[in-house]
Structure formats: structure tokens, C-alpha cells
Image (spheres, rainbow, N blue to C red):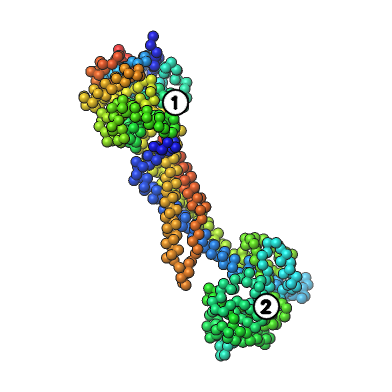
Amino acid sequence: MNRLLPFEWIAAVRFLREGFMQTLFIITGIAIGVGVIVFMSALLTGLQANFVKRVLTSQPQIQLVPPDQVARPQRQQTGVMEDAVIQRPSQRVISIDQWPKIRDRMLAIPEVTAVSPTMAGSALAIRGAASRAISVSGIDPATYYKIVRVPDYIIAGDARLTNDDIIVGTELAKDLGAAIGDKLNVQGVKNASVTLKITGVIDLGNKSANERQTYVALRTAQSLMGVAGGVTTIDMTLDDIYNAEILATQIQRSNYVEADSWIATNAQFFTAVHAQQTSNDMIRLFVALSVAFGIAAVLVVSVIQRSKDIGILRAMGSSRGQVLRIFLLQGGVLGFAGALCGCALGTAGLYWWHAAVRQADGTELFPLILTASLFVYTTLLATVTGLLAAMAPALRAARLDPVVAIRG
Amino acid sequence: MAEQVLRLEHVCKIYNIGLPAQTEVLHDIDMTLDKGQFLALTGPSGSGKSTLLNIIGLLDRPTTGRLFIKGQETGRMGDAEITQLRGHTIGFVFQDHHLISAFTALENVMMPMLVASGFPSRRIAERAHEIMVLVGLEKVENNLAMNMSGGQQQRVAIARALAMAPDLVLADEPTGNLDTKSADSVFELMRQINRDSGTSFLMVTHNLDLAKRCDRIIDVVDGRITA
Ligand SMILES: Nc1ncnc2c1ncn2[C@@H]1O[C@H](COP(=O)(O)OP(=O)(O)O)[C@@H](O)[C@H]1O
Ligand SMILES: [Mg+2]
């Protein structure tokens, strides 16, 4: 007997050990439940982290665009029926009004870590007999690469951009039969046309983006779109990405621009995460309940089986409190031991799933994220559940009349 | 006059009060037990001997009447106080040994001391071993209870009853399940301890031969003391 352990603890562990089969079965049951919780929580965290990583490295967290152009009828008198159909103005390329001033204001906001004006539009890329519709992003590489890590996506050439250069998606290069160093003719609006040299080929990890996306220098895009000196968006990153929505609202209130946060743009994702979290919580609750009932059932039987032992302990001078604690501890130990096995089981399951389930290109579907806090909280939850579940059987044991208990 | 370990005054026990099955099992029991006495309690089955023993052992309370343990009136004591008094002054030996099977023989003997102190200690283990030597079981003290003979188990139970050096050992038919030879040696062990340590014994028995070897015999018939 370990001298550092109290009597109740020793008795609880001995009782569990003596009822080996019962103990084994209930611990297995708890382990499965806890394993499911660990697996699901870690999977959800991984998927979320994956998405957030993409947000952090491949898209602005706030994007400023010109305010929506609204068409208003010219005449409007009370009592006069209008039968004009109000049409939205055509989507011509519109620049942000006084964008350098806005950019400077954005740079002055302490939470903002990078600001980059861009000019985006559509154009036609022609090489020989082949032509493709493309998206042109005119960027200032120095600032833009802080927001979208274009150099990370380069698979050939490099990300350097002069006014005569163009970076193209890998599918587009293939479609046009072009490679690094080849020239492309790009036609923008109003017969604007330039010849650009391919300096880089990128893989954005998405086929349709690879078929359309190109990057050119800001100045080049401005002349292609016929908006000299203009920009269509101002892209920004923040030190705290979850602050984006609040900041976007503030910016929009005090500037003549529309500010879209990544949170609003990806509302669907957040709805999905929220729904998953809710169902995760439900599963947690039901697993906890079934663990609780399992432990209670085992202990109720154990109290009946051990009524003679309880009686004799009482005859030897055990208090009701000591008997209560012996059975509470059994519940706690079952919960704790089951949780430890469950953490191991969940982790093993996660490693297996991570290795077995891959994206089409063989990269991981989600990163393995196993935090200590997940294990600590889950183990705590299971242990407390065990203690609570043991309450009813333990009270029953404590209240046993010793005379009746000894008779068995 | 010798010190009184036990005194009962007008003790009655009625089961199922107010119910159709109401039965008065003990009627107006008066008795005393002096320190160092070995008393035999005899009587036919169902006469109330076990009921009386449970009341004396503070496992049950009398319906009316008063019970004094070492001069203390126990009627007004709360459950915690009663439990404490029981643990420190009374040892139990039952017909069926009632050893806890999850523990070894030695650990069973340590148990009352563990209950009292809360933690195991070298002192407790040594004391338990000494008692095991006293009852002649030091060689098998690390066996589980179920791996011992009936006589050995009963000796362990006696050792356990002695662990807290109680003033009074209550034994309810301790030899009832043993063959004549084992019964005799278990009885002799208790008698020996009684003579050496001065611990009082109250033993329920149907064995008149053993009863005659005690200091005093009390006969219970229909819940009354007749001798
Ligand atoms: N808890 C109880 N409820 C009702 N009757 C009981 C209870 N315990 C004992 N009795 C009755 O009391 C009487 C005495 O029992 P007991 O003290 O066990 O006798 P003995 O030990 O002398 O054989 C018996 O008739 C028994 O049926
Ligand atoms: Mg009896």
C-alpha cells in the first residue's frame, strides 16, 4: 500500500481492480466516447486552421471597393405613376475616388499591417491562333505580396514584375502553349493592347483560377483597363483577422468606399463552422450522458455486490463520508482512466484518418492539430462526469444501514 | 468494584413499529459486562441474540432503554460520534468471517487502523503483523482471504477485531461454521487474548461446551434474559 494515498483511494482502486471485467468494459465504453470527441474536435480545429491559413496567406482580410453605383429616376413627383424600369448601371471599370488619400488613411490605422492598391479587370490573352479570356490583377508587388503570397505559388520563373511582364496561371500557360520568356498579346478595353513577357507561372491550387488568373504591374493594368491612375480595390491585412468585420464597418462609415471583410465574404464558411460546432457540442453532451449512465449503472451494481464489504467497513468505524468517497472516487477513476484511453484512441484514429484520407493531389486534407488543452479539457470533462455519475450510487452506499448491509 | 465496559438499562427493541408486522424482539434487557470478562450468550435461534449484539455494537439503536459504553450514555450521540466510538472501542467477529476479498489477510487486519487514521503507515503495518503473529498466521499473512481455510479466516477476523485494541470484542457465533477442532482452537485463541490483554469478550454460541469455559453465561429466551 502506498503510504501517500488515503484509505478511500486505496479501497476504491482495489474494488475496481477486483471487479476487473466490469471495470474493463466500462473503461472501453468511456474510451470510445471520449475518442470520438477528441477525433471530431481535432478534425474541426484542423479544417478551420486550414481555412484560416488560406485567409492569412492568399486573400486580403479587408477589401475596399468603390461604392455600388445606384441609378435613380430623374423625375419623381407625388401622385405621378412612373413606368420606367430602373436598370443597374453597366459594370464598367470604376476607380476608387481619391484612392491615394484613402490608402494613406488606411496606413495610419494601427491594426492594419499591409495596404495595397490593385486594378482588376478582364482582358483577352492572344498567342498565335489561341486566345483566352483572362482576369488581370494589376498590382504593386512590394505591398501586394505581403497580402497574397504570390511568390509561394510560383512553379516556374519568378514573381518579379516590370511594366512589360506578366505572371500567368499554369493552366492558362498550357492552353496558350506558352512558357517562361514567351510573349503574350493582351487586349483590354477600348482597343488597348500590350505585349507582355511571361516571367512567372503560378499554381493557385485551383483549376479555374489557374485557367484565368494573371498578375501584371499596376501601371500596365491601368492602361489595359483605360483608367489611368485608377485602382479598383484597396487590399489590406490586419494583425487580428477576427477584428476584420468591426474594422470594415468603421472604415465604411468614415470613407466613401465599400469595405468587405473576409468574414462577410466567407459568411458561408462561418455558418458551416458554427453548425459543426453546434453538432459537435450535441455529440459531446450525448457522449457525456451515456458515459454518465454507464458509470452509474456499473456502480449501482457494485454497491449491491459490495454491501457486505460496506457493512463491515461501517462496523470497523468507517464514516458515511468515507464510504461515500470510496464510491465517488471509483466514478472519478473510471472517467479519468477511460478519458486517457479515449485520448489515445482518438489520436490514433486521427493519425490514421490523416494518412488515409487525402486530397486529389495527395496533399493533406487537414493539418493535424492536437493541442494539450483539448486533452486536458476532455479528460477533465470525463472525470467530472464520472464523479457526478457516481453521486447517486455513492449516496446509496453511504446510507446503507450497517446491520442490513452485513446481513447481505 | 471492577470497571464496567458495558451496561444496558431496560433495553427494548421493536421492529416495524406501527406496521402489522410489528414485533418486540427484546424485552426490558438489563445487563452489565465488567472489564476483562468473557461472557457467553446462549439461547435458541430467533431469540434475539444477534439483535442484542448489534445494539451493543452500536450498529443498531434500542427502541427504548439506555446503553452505556465505558460509562458513556450513547442514546444522544449523533451518527459521527457513534461511528467514532464504535471504531475505537468495539471489535466484531461474525459467523461468516466477512473479510474484504479485495485485500490480503494482513491488509484486512490493517483496515480498522486505516479507517481511523486515513493513511497507511509503517506503524500500522507493523502492528497488524504483530497481531498476525499473535494469532499464528504470520506465514500466510499476505494471502488473499479466499485462499485460506475457514479456521484461518476466522483467526484473521479475530486479528482484525483486535487491531484497534478495543475494550470489547463482540463475536456472533464465531465458531458456528467451523469443525470441532478448529472451533476449539479459535475459542482458545480468544480466551487467551482475553486473559493476556484484559479485553472483554461477548460471544454468542450454541456450543454449550464452549459456553461453560467462559466466565459467565447469559441465556436469552424470547428476548428476555433468563439466567
Ligand atoms: N430487521 C428486522 N426486522 C424485523 N424483524 C427482525 C429483524 N431482525 C431480526 N428480526 C427478528 O427478530 C428476532 C430475533 O432475531 P435475531 O436477533 O437474529 O435472533 P438470534 O440471533 O437469536 O437467532 C427474529 O424473530 C427475527 O426474525
Ligand atoms: Mg443470530
Q: Secondary structure at mark 1?
A: helix
From the viewer's perspective, is the residue at label 1 or at label 2 nearer?
A: 2
Return the residue nearer the eye: A75 or B194. Answer: B194
Return the residue nearer the eye: A164 or A244. Answer: A164
Circle 1: is it few (<14), some (14-19), or many (20+) Cα within 10 Å?
A: some
Residues tagged by mark 1 and mark 2 found on one chain of the structure:
no
Disc sitting over residue A54 in the figure: none
Q: Residue A266's spot in the image, x, y percent?
A: 59, 66
Snapshot quadrant of residue A256: bottom right
Say which residue appears at 66% left-offset and 81% top-offset: A163
Return the residue nearer the eye: A397 or A42. Answer: A42
Say which residue appears at 67% left-offset and 86% top-offset: A192
Horizontal side of A306 relative to A191 (left or right) equals: left
Say which residue appears at 55% left-offset and 84% top-offset: A179
Q: Give the residue type at disc 1.
A: Gln
Chain designation of label 1: B
Question: Can see residue A231?
Answer: yes
Whether residue A307 is situated above or below residue B198 in the rendered picture:
below
The C terminus of chain A - image quarter = top left
Disc sitting over residue A218 in the figure: 2
The N terminus of chain A - image quarter = top left
Horizontal side of A229 relative to B7 (left or right) equals: right
Disc sitting over residue B84 in the figure: 1
Chain designation of label 2: A
